Image (spheres, rainbow, N blue to C red):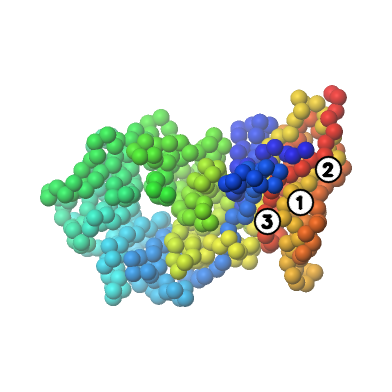
Amino acid sequence: MRLAGFIGPSYTLQSVNYDCQTCINLFPQINEIGSGKEREVASFIMTPGLVLKNTLADGPIRGVHKASNGTLYVAAYNKLYSIASDYTDTEVGTLLTTSGPVSFADNGITLALVDGQSGYGVTLLTQTFNQFSDPDFKTADVVVFQDGYFIFNEKGTGRFFISRLNSVDFDALDFATAEGNPDDIISIISDHRDLWIFGTQSTEVFYNSGNGDFPFERIQGAFIEHGCAAAFSVQKMNNQVFWIGSDDKGNGIVYRASGYQPQRISTHAVELAIRGYASISEAVAYTYQDNGHDFYVLNFPGASTSWAYDATTNLWHERAFTNNGSFQRHRAENHAFFNGAHIVGDYENGKLYELSSEAYTDAGEEITRQRAAPHITSGLKRVFYNSFQLDMEVGVGLDGAVSTQGHNPQAMLQYSDDGGHSWSDEKWVSFGKIGKRLKRAIWRRLGQSRDRVFRVTITDPVKIAIIGAEMDIVQGGN
């Protein structure tokens, strides 16, 4: 019989006895015409691996930005670099800080960046770098560009301010206050020429009215009674705005805006994980599109995984880096589409990677791909398991020496008979050396249980495509 729900999202609740599904370094891809094998509506495909492109002198990578001139700019530790198409780097300038996210925007002539303490400008044509010295420039965490203006939050206040038109000069009177709620502005984003101003408990949307005194005015009715819990969780993708919410009732729900209305996209399982992290406010997100999927990826300091929302399927999965057999949050902290590739920066060191679906390792380190399926019960009567088989693409081993990892790729099966609290010994089977297309990834004589969860893990650097799982079972009488 087919194991219903084997292809699915990460979804672990307060009680693992109820649900303890994991989907790590795999994600469901929907069969759009609905006629896949066994009429499965989706299959598992691999999250991308990492290809090292450059190692800068120091890290972490604090921000990346592809400028209008096609150059990639990278803030790493206290340096700003420009990256050429061959990924060679040139130092552009020195920042006054060494940690924390750096925000970028450019107008085609000047690149502006802020680090939460100071502001800086780079003339794109000459690569001239300077710190903003205008006394009317205020401390800011975030900068965006819209309609000829650089726009900044004034840190620690409910105000935002703008540059002069087509300039990086400032006027002390060029500011506005988000007055719908007396909360500090912590983030800003420009989307469809609307200016979203995020406070800690509310959000207001402004538009460019052309007013000569101050060009940005509130849109009537565009007041959202949900603010933002993490300034750098705010991202846009697929014509929508995403963020981790916060208001006077609590925080930790992930929202996507539909028009000016917030829609909850996080699940109870994702929200449970978020509440368990030490610092929600330090979350950093990035978005990207690949092979028809739109991903919103959330990182939290100290977490054991990163969370990724696929807006194409509305499902969440986890991404993790394998360190000595244990999961850590994924290495990628920020993203820019540069040189036809998805370039990401490492949150801990100075490495720049390409995020590539053709890469089967994380810059040479193995990727652990794991799926824990839904509980299997039959009225809590005994079920006897003659076999468990992965329906997957087989015969994908690497062409090389026998000692090469991936030459004879293996899948590892474990199961839990106590509701997901503990797991059996590891049981390994091959899913096929190169060309062995009739190989079966099957485990036999798996005992009995009243409540079972199967978990499959694969670490070999080969193509992984899982369609589903089959079981040969016998129902018991009690």
Q: Nearer the viewer, mark 2 or mark 1?
A: 2
Helix, strand or loop under label 1: strand
**Residue 304 percent location from the top left of the image:** 59, 49
Give the mark, 3 or 1, whose residue is nearer the N terminus. 1
Q: Along the horizontal axis of the image, is 347 left or right of 304?
A: left
**Type of residue at label 2?**
Ser
The residue identified by callout 1 is 412
Please determine whether, in this image, residue 133 is positioned above or below residue 222: below
The residue identified by callout 2 is 387
- Residue lying furthest left in this view? 212
Residue at point 80% right, 57% down?
Answer: 438
The residue identified by callout 3 is 464
Q: Along the horizontal axis of the image, is 34 left or right of 291?
A: right
Q: CA distance from mark 3 to mark 1?
A: 13 Å
Q: CA distance from mark 2 to mark 1?
A: 14 Å
Helix, strand or loop under label 3: loop
Report which quarter residue 35 is drawn in: top right
Residue at point 71% right, 43% down?
Answer: 38
Give the mark, 2 or 3, whose residue is nearer the N terminus. 2
On the question of residue 374 being in view, the answer is: yes
**Residue 227 percent location from the top left of the image:** 36, 38
Please determine whether, in this image, residue 424 is positioned above or below residue 147: above
Residue at point 41% right, 60% down?
Answer: 63
**Type of residue at label 1?**
Met
**Type of residue at label 3?**
Ile
On the question of residue 272 being in view, the answer is: no
422 vs 387, nearest the viewer: 387
Give the mark, 2 or 1, whose residue is nearer the N terminus. 2
Please determine whether, in this image, residue 76 is positioned above or below residue 272: below
Circle 1 residues within 10 Å: few <14, some 14–19, many ≥20: some
251 vs 357, nearest the viewer: 357
